[in-house]
Amino acid sequence: MNISTLFSSSAQGAVPIYAVSQAMLESALAGPLERHATWLRASAFTAAAGKIVLLPGAGGDVAGVAFGLGADEDPLAAGALTAQLPAGTYAFALTPPGTRGTALALGWAMGAYAFSRYKGQERVKQRAVLAWPDDADRAQVTRVAHGLFLARDLVNTPASDMGPAELAQAAEEVAREHGARFSVVEGRALIERNYPMIWTVGAGSPRLPRLIDFRWGNDSHPRVTLVGKGVCFDSGGLDIKPASAMLTMKKDMGGAAAVLGLSHMVMDAKLPVALRFLIPAVENSVSCEAYRPGDVLKSRKGLTVEVGNTDAEGRLVLADALAEADAEAPALLLCMATLTGAARVATGFDLPPFFTQDDALAADLMRASQSESDPMWRLPLWRGYRGLIEGKVADLTNNPDSPNAGAITAALFLERFVDKAKAFAHFDIAAWTDRAKPGRPLGGEAQAIRAIFAMLKARYQ
């Protein structure tokens, strides 16, 4: 989706939007909305969140829009507008004190997203257009929305059209757009180049596994490395998932999609960092070539891993990628993955957990999370659970015996492959919105990347 088509540079002739919280309703009815007060009361407008009332003009046209913000707790509330308004150009004429134009415009853009790749043109709704708010940072809104839309599109695309090769192509297009240096290690070359676990997990599929890699920026700048899980479809392997659990497994490459969207933001903003992007891209399939429960795998780092369950494949492919990333001792190493169902049980779909031993990094992330209204929550890398990931016949197991603390033990497993990075954090994201909210439609989502980008800007800009 072209972000520029969602906005107008001119407010001339635009229909005014009066965004009203419950706290300011009476003053608005006695002020800017006074001539529409009778109509709004008759329409039972109470400024409930997401509620809109079209205000009639003298000639039967739309003279304005009253938009309810409820308790005014959602900075992205404007995302509820685009799906409800008729086609036309609109401009905010009233907002609560302190409202930022950048947040209004970003919410508007996020709500305009629609995944229409497989729909006929006649089914694609024409969208309303917003006149840019005067104080909106247009470049910031555009780059963030573009990164989000890119990630959402990748997650929403079915696995039939989004395998390891297609994911590599998408990454290469972003790399080329920004002048990054792109490379890929594919198929049996993974064995020759010592990425054995990426090869093993992907070997059960005829769609060859690969390690996607690009670099951007000045090598004299602080190195920031982003690693994302790129399991393009996860059947569970020989430990096959039930049918209901496979329905959304096209999203199992959501970590890769998220870091690709984040990489676009970093490169578009030209942050002074040496960026590296790594994606182990595989399909976890069932075949005579698939790896088995009980197999012992050697990793790039040299640690051996006992396979307790072939459906715990994400941590295996990430381990090889993290070992590669860690070898350069980056200033910051971030990993994003749809790694565990345990994370969803612990914090739900709205609140992705993250894990780090670095208190300063955790504080920066939480600060950015609050400022950007991009939720996340820190969970502990509890050392007391390290024994749970020790293997019986190998150094490690990918499937601890205990059914408890699954998100933590998965994060501890990944941490074993990181020694040299100055700071490390792992995000266990859902990559999916299960209940539509303003600006966050049902389907693929790049959780936490708006906050991470804000943190990176604060640290390095």
Image (cartoon, rainbow, N blue to C red):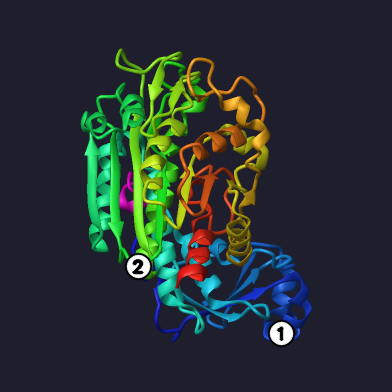
**Disc number at residue 268?**
2
In which quarter of the view is residue 305 placed?
top left
- Is label 2 in a helix, a strand or a loop? helix
Residues at discs 2 and 1 in contact (Cβ within 8 Å) = no
Q: Main secondary structure of the magenta part?
A: loop
| Total tally of numbered discs in the picture | 2
Q: Amino acid at mark 1?
A: Glu
Residue span colored magenta: 116-125
Q: Amino acid at mark 2?
A: Asp
Question: Mark 1 highlights which residue?
Answer: 34
* Towards the viewer: 300 or 336: 300
Classify the position of the C terminus by image quarter. bottom left
Residue 90 at x, y = what percent?
A: 49, 76
Q: Residues within 10 Å of mark 2 (few under 14, many from 20)?
A: some
- Judged left or right of residue 235, residue 215 is left
Whether residue 362 is in magenta: the answer is no
Whether residue 117 is in magenta: the answer is yes
Q: Residues within 10 Å of mark 1 (few under 14, many from 20)?
A: some
* Towards the viewer: 450 or 228: 228
Residue drawn 30% across the image and 36% down it: 163
Classify the position of the N terminus by image quarter. bottom left
* Towards the viewer: 4 or 356: 356
As measured in the structure, the alpha-carbon distance from the residue carrying label 2 to the one carrying label 1 is: 44 Å
| Marks 2 and 1, the one that precedes in the sequence | 1
